Image (cartoon, grey):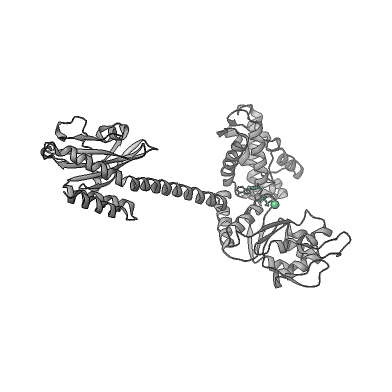
Amino acid sequence: MDQIACLYEISQALSNTNLKGSLKQVLSILHDYMGIERGYISILDYHQAEIHIEVAYGISEEARRRGRYRLGEGITGEVVATGRPIVVPIIGNEPRFLNRTRTRTEHEKKSTSFFCIPIKVGNQVLGTLSVDKRLEQEERLQIDLRFLSVVAALIAQTVYNLLVFEAEKRQLEEENIKLKEKLIEKYDFKHSIVGRSKAMKEVLSLTARAAQSDATVLIRGESGTGKELVANAIHYNSPRAKRPFVKINCAALPETLIESELFGHEKGAFSGAHVSKKGQFELANGGTIFLDEISEINHHLQAKLLRVLQEKEFYRVGGTKPIKVNVRVIAATNQNLEEAIKTGKFREDLYYRLNVFPIYIPPLRERRTDILLLTEHFLEEFNKKYGKSITRISTPAIDLLMKYHWPGNIRELKNCIERAVIVCDENVIRSYHLPPSLQTAESTQTQKGSSLKLAVESLEREMITEALKATKGNCSQAARRLDTTLRILSYKIKKYGLDPNMFK
Ligand SMILES: Nc1ncnc2c1ncn2[C@@H]1O[C@H](COP(=O)(O)OP(=O)(O)O)[C@@H](O)[C@H]1O
Ligand SMILES: [Mg+2]
């Protein structure tokens, strides 16, 4: 064998930037020059304390994948563990030989030698170089071992690079997955907005469509139904997501301040305006502005807002030159705007400008199927927040939650679950952990159903509920149906915590 020519070719092969490819080529060169029958380069995975064949010559891909050894296991495991080479003159005579790749026939085992040499950088063993070679004369074994040790030293750097490369690749992949998950979690409103009722599915699909468009959105719904949550979801799923999202509660600011808050002011515009100041519309440029409780702005501001929506420009308070902005408007209200138009409180033209993309969120009592889902969602949230591990909600407590009419909607349910988690010192939320407003006469489950009083109450409640259902919540009609007076019915409705509006 021409050792110099062989080493030269190996060094050429190692200059290849494809690390695995060049190692494969080295094994093939060993076949050409040394006549090896099979060759293996195995590497140690520190995390799993396992050695596996990374590159092979002369065996099938399946056989390569079978080549896995624990540290100290078999010849390969022992070489990695000790850092010293092993030569087995005749495989068949070596009890430690595992033949895990199952590639050698019984006949071959009687005439084949196995060389296993550690691949090291400094004192650190990275893996092994091993070969199957037909046994010729015993004295050649030492010569071949020495030569293979040189080859192992030559390829060590490449194996090291391969290990680092693979580790970095895996780390990047893991980081990438984590980052993507975070983004999805933060922006995917399908997870932040809970609800599987038909009504909520509709809201979700409208929200998704609103996010894609750049239209002005008007979100309607009672207080606590999730209007602000939907506004957030629209912005953070829209092309403007990386630009500012500014929220203004039009009811929270006094009329005198809100104009300059929204549109800014020039120096000297009013007493106290010592410097000029940008308004929220300017600060939101490129992004979205959320105008909550839009029904609360006065006529002057309504006109100004209309102009922004039509012309995309406005004047600062005390300003003389128009300011151009590119801002998307999302407005919300729990008021009946149509009524406000009739009474002259709200401009009709502004209403049409706002109502380009309406989203209505129904009250919680109209989508009771969401109650359990939301309860579980908040339970998980507050378990985390307060370090508790409440696993269950008792059936009577669930009954209370399901029956209640939730005038404060999801906000009220959320507060109710938070309170329950705080006061609950077992792992089950029970009815007495819920606020008194939920405890109707029927559901104080302390005395079980054997009493006549309870049975009568239960029947009464049921009959009243039926009558209210049949009359769509009209109490006078319901009283007539039940052959009682409106006064008595009203009293019982209150007693049983019913809400006639629920049946409209
Ligand atoms: N569908 C929902 N899923 C999860 N949480 C919700 C949902 N709707 C509302 N919430 C929560 O309820 C509370 C009130 O919602 P919010 O958007 O402020 O209501 P609104 O603006 O209509 O008064 C918030 O804490 C919000 O996160
Ligand atoms: Mg709100």
In the displayed orientation, state which residue is furthest to the right: 271
Name the foreground residue: 7 vs 76.
7
Residue 97 in the figure: left or right of residue 328: left
In the displayed orientation, state which residue is furthest to the front: 4
Note whether residue 343 is visible. no
Residue at left 57%, top 34%? 395
Image spot of residue 287 (x, y percent): 65, 62
Name the foreground residue: 237 vs 487.
237
Residue 335 in the figure: left or right of residue 375: right
Residue 40 falls in image quadrant: top left
Residue at left 79%, top 55%? 253
Residue at left 30%, top 43%? 153
Name the foreground residue: 236 vs 299.
236
Residue 238's place in the image compared with 496, above or below, is below
Note whether residue 239 is visible. yes
Residue 196's place in the image compared with 208, above or below, is above
Image spot of residue 105 (x, y percent): 13, 40
Image spot of residue 312 (x, y percent): 70, 70
Image spot of residue 496 (x, y percent): 69, 38
Name the foreground residue: 177 vs 199.
177
Residue 206 falls in image quadrant: bottom right
Q: How many numbered marks does the figure carry? A: 0
